[in-house]
Image: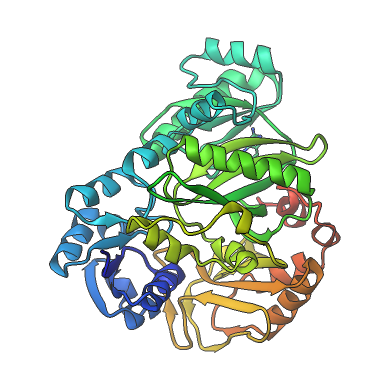
Amino acid sequence: MISKILIANRGEIAVRIIRAAKEMGLKTVIVYSKADKESLGVKLADQAICIGPPPASESYLFYQNIISAALSVKADAIHPGYGFLAENWQFADACRMMKIRFIGPKSNVIRQMGDKAKAKALMKESGVPVVPGSDGIIDSFTRAEETVDRIGFPVIIKASAGGGGKGMRIVNEKKDLEKSYLYAANEAQQAFGDSRVYIEKYISAPKHIEFQVLGDKHGHVIHLFERDCSIQRRHQKLVEEAPSACLDDETRKKMGDIAVKAAQTAQYDSAGTIEFLYDQGSRNFYFIEMNTRIQVEHPVTESITGIDLIKYQIKIANGDHLDLQQTSIQRRGHAIECRINAENPEKDFNPNPGKIIQLRIPGGPGIRVDSGVYAGYAIPPFYDSMVAKLIAWGNDRRESIERMKRALDEYYIEGVKTTIPFHKEVLRHKDFLSGQYTTDFVNRLAPSS
Ligand code: MV4
């Protein structure tokens, strides 16, 4: 039985995991880099162990030290959060070898879903709709030509070891294909040490719809509906909502059933996400990838279902049977999340770390704030710039929007520039209000250089 959890992460997600563990009566240990000594997670955990200097490669990614820390305090499980080691199959495997439970899926599942071309082929084989394309790795320009002759332009070249948008290249005409293919393969090699790429038909201005799934170690899988994550900038999501304002109940039901089938195909246990591109014109949807971690935007799903996803991750890692049935999962109301980043939206969203001089956190009905900062805290420059997530729940979309606007007005952060003004603009934009916005929304609002 799990009784002590080591948190191999920082910031708001470390705090979120500590909160879930404490409510379950479990002991918590956090590891931290020298830059995070004064973090909220270090203050809230039962125990804290410094694992190295600020650079992540020497601390949060240096998993041998993290495993040593877990062994030294007799932690029975490690929660990786998101980012850092969350989708590192070698780390999950090392935990297993050291008899520490990795709070996430099996290492071979992380590995398989991390190879995006292989994951796509596996899904297609079991009847999950995928975007037409190369159905596997493109290992020569000749094969690239054959593929585009079959599917037509525009196409998108993706790194198989990528995901989340890194190493992608859109190609509109034949004369650019060879250059783009070589460029994409080279970029993939630089970024992931793996040059393999695959090709898909490029879907223009799609919606990014993802389904939350939960599976246990006994083969029981359910979904917890969708999140609309179409508001992103340079592949960083900025606003997420559930349910999606663009889905009809018939399409939602089809996508949910397919999401469960995809997770079953992957032999998935723990919390995971099935990503789809949704074409509003044709109402077609396509699996693009699976994320084998808890995601930043999970509170949106928690808000509309009342289900604590972190607690379920822990229970599932412990081997418990999932005590939820698909037919008993009810959606209630609407939730929106705004990511509050220490970035200057007026200066190309440049990171803006520094000391928080004053802080007023919103509250009241329907408002949740997941944050790792406090007044007087200095945001270190070494990691991502997200300092808080503001989640607004309402009985319907209109109420959640009004609550979010009200909460953004209440929020006062002095000392660092944040994305709050950007969010205020999004919330009054006609395309956001209509719910019909697509992945090109931010680029049209604030064209990136
Ligand atoms: C696509 C696509 C269009 N067609 N795939 C980006 C994030 C990653 N999870 C999937 N992504 C996309 N995949 C096909 N077949 C559009 C995106 C996409 C995108 C692509 C290039 C530049 C910006 C983008 C923003 C959102 C989605």
Kindly identify the residue that appears in the image at 48 percent across and 88 percent down: 375
Kindly identify the residue that appears in the image at 40 percent across and 32 percent down: 189
| Residue 56 image position (x, y, % from top left) | 32, 59
Decide: is 33 above or below 252. below
In this rendered view, identify the residue nearer to me: 297 or 26. 26
Decide: is 310 above or below 150. below
Picture quarter with the N terminus: bottom left
Q: Quadrant of residue 72?
A: bottom left
Decide: is 423 above or below 143. below
In this rendered view, identify the residue nearer to me: 20 or 70. 20
- Quadrant holding ligand 1? top right
| Residue 322 image position (x, y, % from top left) | 45, 56
In this rendered view, identify the residue nearer to me: 369 or 259. 259
In this rendered view, identify the residue nearer to me: 309 or 278. 309
Kindly identify the residue that appears in the image at 50 percent across and 83 percent down: 356
Kindly identify the residue that appears in the image at 32 percent across and 72 percent down: 35
Q: Quadrant of residue 128?
A: top right
| Residue 429 image position (x, y, % from top left) | 82, 63
Q: Is residue 388 visible?
A: yes
Using residue 317 as the reference point, say whether residue 307 is left or right of it: right
